[in-house]
Image: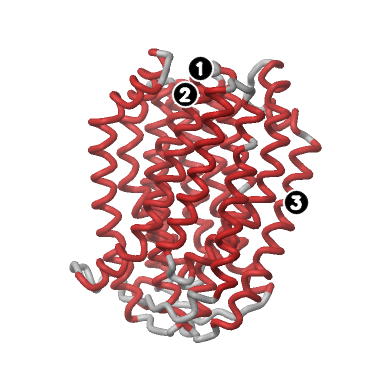
Amino acid sequence: MASPAINTDLRVQISNRNILKIALPISAAMAIPNVNFITNNIFLGGLGEKQLAVAGITGVYYLIFALIGNGLNSGLQSLISRRAGENRPEEIGKLFINGILVALAIAFFGIVITQIATPYIFRYALHDEENVKLAVDFLSIRIWGLVFLYIYQMRNALLVGISQTKLLFIAALAETLTNIFFDYTLIYGHLGFPKLSFNGAAYASIIAEFVGMIIIFLVIHIRGIGKQFSLFSHLTFSRKHFTQIFTVSSPLMLQFAVSLISWEFFYILIEHHGDEQLAISNAMRNVFGFFGCFSWAFAAATTAMVSNVIGQGLQNRVPELINRIMKMSVGFSIIVCLIINIIPRQFLSIYGQDESFITNGIPVLRIISIALILMAVSVVWLNSVTGTGSTKVTLLIEVFAIIFYCIYVYVVLEKLQLSITFGWMSEWLYWTCLFVPSFLFIRSGKWKNRKI
């Protein structure tokens, strides 16, 4: 029997307890899928250094499209949170369904682009022909998971927007367990499954995303959320809501795309330095994904809570809210930084590579640990801009940071041919460039009368 919906008053309160109530379940839900990435790389590392290296390029490529979906997710989340703050639940179901329609259209576009353009892009950009073949074959399979991933991400927008973040954990756990099982069976051919080697990770991830999508919709049904917000009573296209979602989300989608394209550019430059450097950098991506989940969780909470509080007409309390969230985000990141620097060898050893991989990876890991603290500050302030609905400003801030980032990595890695340790210092520059204009914009107060 379906349980009644949990909360009829959707307005959030500004308190440390409420911030943690929203952010901690998000961090747990984010940490679990990042266990997927690490698990994928541990299994792929068993196939060899080359497979671990190429996993970095394919992983970042897929992340470009995944974060385009995340941009849509953030925009939809901001809209849902604003309606929650206004206590207008009847609008939430309409926004959710039209968000899914936008997501499906973008997924189709991503699949077509990947199947047609990716072989040409990688043949032009990568130096090793074997790397090209591995990457193209993998992505021609992996990209089909976008459909399930995007629908899965829309549930994030809904649950974060209505402050039901603890439900994120259930689907994330189901997805991770599925991914680990099929990584083990499909990569190596265990338990009677076919041995698909590198491509086995692609099939495992698609199956896992499908399972996560199904589980979360079952949870939404069982908890009565679908009924409360009439999620499936408005299965028709609404020009008004479609336009609202696209207007708010499109700058964010472009922002995330630009950000990840620049990271793919970074990885392509790393590939020119050899497989070991690329494999180390892939491990660093895992560090950002797993240990950065606390910062991204607080960032997601920032978007939702800032939008909700503005919806309540409490614009004057937004700076107080941001500072509370930022202090918590930085506190968690300092703990992570200390852990990473105390046991760097133990962390890098899980990838099953040789001593050279560990020795050369430790200095990079220390650079990353400092970048995590800078990120903890920057993402909260950047997402506060998103929460105000000023998504075009968010895009401009991202473009500003990316220009400096790309110039730096090109000069350091391609022209000066310095080590990847110096290349990864680009993260310090990037997060600083995001923080400064975000902070200045919020302090200016220009966002206070914006309607979405």
Query: Up-down: is 450 above or below 379?
Result: below
Inspect the image, locate mark 1, and give the three-letter code of the amino acid beneath it. Lys
Inspect the image, locate mark 3, and give the three-letter code of the amino acid beneath it. Ile
- Sequence order check, earlier mark of 2 and 3: 2
| Whether residue 4 can be seen here | no
For mark 1, what is the residue?
Answer: 50
Query: Up-down: is 308 above or below 331?
Result: below
Q: Residue at x 55, y 30 (%)?
A: 282
For mark 3, what is the residue?
Answer: 334
Circles 3 and 1, Cβ within 8 Å, touching? The answer is: no
* Horizontal arrangement in the rendering, residue 19 relative to residue 36 (left or right): right
Task: Give the Cα separation between the discs numbered 2 and 3.
Answer: 31 Å
For mark 2, what is the residue?
Answer: 54
The x, y position of residue 253, in whole percent, is: 38, 53
Task: Give the Cα separation between the discs numbered 3 and 1.
Answer: 33 Å
Circles 2 and 1, Cβ within 8 Å, touching? The answer is: yes
Inspect the image, locate mark 2, and give the three-letter code of the amino acid beneath it. Val
The x, y position of residue 405, in whole percent, is: 53, 40
Quick one: label 3, few (<14), some, or many (20+) residues within 10 Å?
Answer: some
Q: Quadrant of the C terminus?
A: bottom left
The x, y position of residue 262, in whole percent, is: 46, 38
Quick one: label 1, few (<14), some, or many (20+) residues within 10 Å?
Answer: some
The x, y position of residue 173, in whole percent, is: 52, 50
| Whether residue 23 can be seen here | yes
